[in-house]
Image: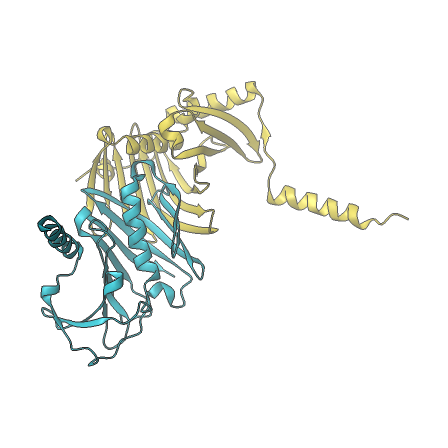
Chain colours: A yellow, B cyan
Amino acid sequence: MNNPKPVLMAFIFGLLCTAVFPQTKPLSRADASEVINRISEVSKSTLSIESHFTQSKEISVIREKIISKGVFYFKKEKLLRWEYTDPFPYLVIFNNDRIYVKDEDSENHINIQSNKVFREINNILIGAVKGTLLSDSKNFQSSISDLRDLYQAILVPKNPRIKETLSEIILYFNKSDYTVEKLMLREVSGDYTSIEFSGKKINQNIENEKFTIP
Amino acid sequence: MKSLLYLNIFTIIFLTACSPVKKSQLASCPKGSYKVPSWKSPFLVTFEKALFHTTLDIKGNHLSGITIIKRTSDTSFHFTFANEIGITYLDLDILKDTFHPLYIFEPMNKKSFLKILAYDLKLLLFSDSNYGNPEKFIQKSTGKEVFSYPGMNLFVWPDSETGRITKLAGWTTPFDAAIIGFNPVSDTFPSHIIISNPRIKLSLEMNLLGR
C-alpha cells in the first residue's frame, strides 16, 4: 500500500502557500483597461484624502525593518502633507513646486524645480496616492493583477533618473472603492518601503493651512 | 640640499596642519607619570544593533532620515541611512580593513566623499586602545585628559570617572581629519553621536532612537 503521508504533506503545504502567499492572477488587457478607467474616474472625483499610515522600510541585507507611523493629507491638485509621529516627529509638506521639511531641530525649504530628485519623488508620491501613475505610460510600464480583495499594479520605471533609485512601484487598490490601500517602493538595492493606509477619509474638508509653508 | 630642507619643513607644516587637534592647546605630562586607560568604541561593547535619527550636512546640503547600524560579525558592521520616506541614501558594509558600498544614492556617489565617510565610520566603529603606548596631555582650556597615539594619528578623550570615551579625533590625510563626540557618557551607550570633518564641512549627527 502506498504511503499517503507525502500526498497529505503536499496538500497541506499547498494550502499553507495559498494562505500565506496569496496568488495573483494577471488581468486580461480588457479587464486591466476597465480597472484603470475606474481608478482614473475615482481619482478625478477625489478632492482630498486624510489617512493614517504605517510605513515599513525593509533592509534586505540584514533582514531588519524600520517602522514609522503618522498621518497623511492630500488635497487636489498638488498639496501633500506627511506628518510622522513615530519614531520621531517629522513633517514634509509638498506644496506645488515647493517642499518644506521640519524635524526636531531644523527646518528646510526645497525648490522642486532646482532639485530633480525631489521632483521625481514628489511626482511619484502624488501619482501613487491619486492612482494616476497607472496612466503614465511615458514613465512607467504597468501590469495589473487580481489579488483577492485588491488589485495589484506593478509599475516598472522607464525614466532613467527614476530607474537609478527605484526598480518597481507596486500599488494595491481596494476593489470596492478603487482607492490606494498600500504602496510599495522597491529600490535598486533590493530594499523596499511599504506604506499602508488606514482610516481613510475621502473628500472631507481639509484646511488649506495644513499645506501652508512657513 | 636647500630644496630638501624646504621640502622637509613643508612636509612637517603640512602634516601638522592635518591634525584636527592643535598641540599648542595641550600640556604634555611626563612619561611614566600616568596610567594608560583601556577603552573601546561603544560599538565594540556588547553591541548588536541601534537605530538613530540622523542628519547629514555637507557643503550646504542637508539630508535627514534614519540610520540603522548592525553588528554583522566580530569584524564587521552594516550601516544603512535612509530618508524618512524610506529611500536609501547609503547602504554599506564596514569591515575593519575594508569598506563595501552596497548602494549609494546617485547624487552622493562621489569617490572622495565615500573615502572620507569610510574613514569616519571605521574610526567610529573600530577604535580601541590596542594601538600601543599613548602620550598623555592635559587640554589647557578644559583641564581634560587627552591621550595621543602618534603612530595612528589618533587623539582620545576618555572620561576619568567612567573610562568611556567622550571624544575621538583622527586623520590619515589632510582631507579626512575627523572629530567624533559621544554624549552622554554616563549611560551604557551614547544617545548622541556627532562626526565632523571640518575641512570638507561634513557633519553627521546621530540621535539614538532605540537598540
Q: In the orientation shown, which residue stands out farthest toward the right?
A: A1
| Residue A82: % across, % down | 31, 41
Tell me what residue is drawn at x 43 percent, y 46 percent.
A56
Q: Is residue A1 above or below residue B40?
A: above
Q: In the orientation shown, which residue stands out farthest toward the top?
A: A30
Left or right side of B180 for A17: right
| Residue A60: % across, % down | 47, 46
Left or right side of A112 for B102: right
Q: Is residue B36 above or below residue B171?
A: below
Q: Which quadrant would the C terminus of chain A be assigned to in this image?
A: top left
The mark total stands at: 0
Tell me what residue is drawn at x 9 percent, y 64 percent.
B24
Front residue (pair B134, B20): B134
Front residue (pair B66, B157): B157
- For residue A26, say whether it is visible: yes
Q: Is residue A16 above or below residue B152?
A: above
| Residue A175: % across, % down | 52, 32
Instruction: Choose top left, top right, bottom left or bottom right for residue A168.
Output: top left
| Residue A73: % across, % down | 32, 38
Tell me what residue is drawn at x 33 percent, y 69 percent.
B130
Q: Is residue B6 above or below residue A130?
A: below
- For residue A89, say whether it is visible: no
Front residue (pair B197, B35): B35
Left or right side of A36 for B19: left
Left or right side of B74 for A209: left
Front residue (pair B45, B209): B45
Tell me what residue is drawn at x 30 percent, y 27 percent.
A77
Instruction: Choose top left, top right, bottom left or bottom right for residue A212.
Output: top left
Q: In the orientation shown, which residue stands out farthest toward the front?
A: B1
